[in-house]
Amino acid sequence: MKSEIVNKINLINKGKIPEGYKKTEKSKIIPREWQIKKFDECIEITKGQVNPNINPYCKMIHIGLANIEKLTGRLLYTNLANEEDLTSSKYYFDKDTVLYGKIRPELGKVLYANFEGICSADIYPLKTLHNLKAKYLKYILLDNKFYKFTVRSSMRTGMPKINREDLSTYVFTIPTINEQEKISEILDTWDKLIELKEMLIKEKQKNKKGLMERLLTGKVRLKGFNDKWNRIKLDKLIEESKEKSIENNQHNILSVTKEGIYLQSEYFNRQIASKDNIGYKVVRKNNLVFSTMNLWMGSIDILNKYDIGIVSPACKVFYLNEELVDISFMKYFIKSSYMMNLYSLNSEQGASIVRRNLDLKGLLSTNVRLPNIDEQKKIGEILGISSREIDLLEKEVELLKYQKKGIMQLLLTGIVRV
């Protein structure tokens, strides 16, 4: 960060007024040309609902909460009203309207609409008045300050929504029209960059999935490998571990999910396991672990992020026979479409639709086709490169989001001028 910005922040934090700034009645320091406004002074919430099944509304785009991506201000998809089975009344909105999801404000559902349409009654259509631009309003609503205000307000009322009365009290700063447009343009550029990176990640993931399908089934062979693949029972490749914890909280509690193995406290933001976890399964680095009830959904992985942990007694933990299988190869093989089909075939629906009863004996007696250990290692190496490339892109996106958040704070408070 430039020294002039740091100096400006230090001055403001000390209550001193930098050159070109002013102190408001509530001791807030803002640029001299900026104004402080209440929500209801410059924003109007559309009133009056329409029938989505009559002209012209039935031929308009319909926006519901599901159409808006949380926390990003991004439109996911659209349908015309007559393409959906709409029964309740909707709000009409015209071009240059900001749509804000009033239900569950922690989701941060915000959309700038450059088209006319109708929206769910769970959404406020917001029209800007006087000297406020709609695109700039979008970023005010996506700002962390507004997010905290709406979540706090909804918690205070005990309702999972933000009402009109609470919104009307929100106070924010408004730059000049010219500066609003420039700030919006800068933040739009960051949004487009993040979106392009995320599109690239999806394309890379699609390519990786296709590569896995070809390499893990032998449809495509690597140069220099011509040996016939062997058929071998799963129970020859893995051996169940019987190790259990002998004291409470002996190791970190882990959860195996469709996305991988994570610290339970981080994945769920809380510990969902029993406080008495003596007798939990111990899982060590390079062990295979899966949930017997959710295996059909892909809740299986090989532990490589942590050296040791414990998992629910409902899980199964296995050592890998490293004479027959390469660990890096198996990490992808167990997630292949071929194996996913086997898990589904050996899982019968029980009392719950989601949780199914696994026929472990039947699964382990199944024959699978595998290349020799050298070809496995090469396949694992190639897929590992693809995975690392995606991981780096995902970290880059997270960094861009973090940077954008910081830039938003500097721009929307006027600490950085454009």
Image (spheres, rainbow, N blue to C red):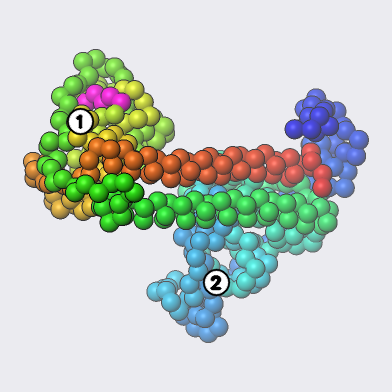
Q: Give x and y (percent) for residue 262.
A: 37, 33
Residue 323 has which mark? 1
Q: Is mark 2 on a helix, strand or loop?
A: strand
Q: Are marks 1 and 2 in contact (CB under 8 Å)?
A: no
Of tags 1 and 2, which is closer to the observer? Answer: 1
Residue drawn at the location 31% of the way across and 20% of the way down: 251
Amino acid tagged 2: Ile
* Label ID, residue 259: none
- Of callouts 1 and 2, the N-terminal one: 2
Rendering coords of residue 220 (x, y %):
31, 55
Q: In this view, does 359 lie to the left or right of 380?
A: left
In the picture provided, is 263 more to the left or to the right than 246? right
Q: Nearer the viewer, residue 413 or 86?
A: 413
Residue 389, compared with residue 186, is above or below; it is above
Mark 1: which secondary structure?
loop
Q: Name which residue lies at 61% across and 73% down.
A: 116
x, y percent for residue 155: 51, 41
Q: Give the range drawn in magenta.
A: 281-285
Q: Pointer 2: what residue?
A: 118
Distance CA(mark 1)–CA(mark 2): 62 Å
Inspect the magenta stretch and tell me whether residue 302 lies in it.
no
Instruction: Please name the amino acid that badge 1 sits on.
Output: Glu
| Rendered residue at 26%/29% (across/down) | 287
Which x, y percent locates residue 338?
A: 23, 52
Residue 280: image quadrant is: top left
Name the residue rendered at 67%, 47% in the picture.
Answer: 170
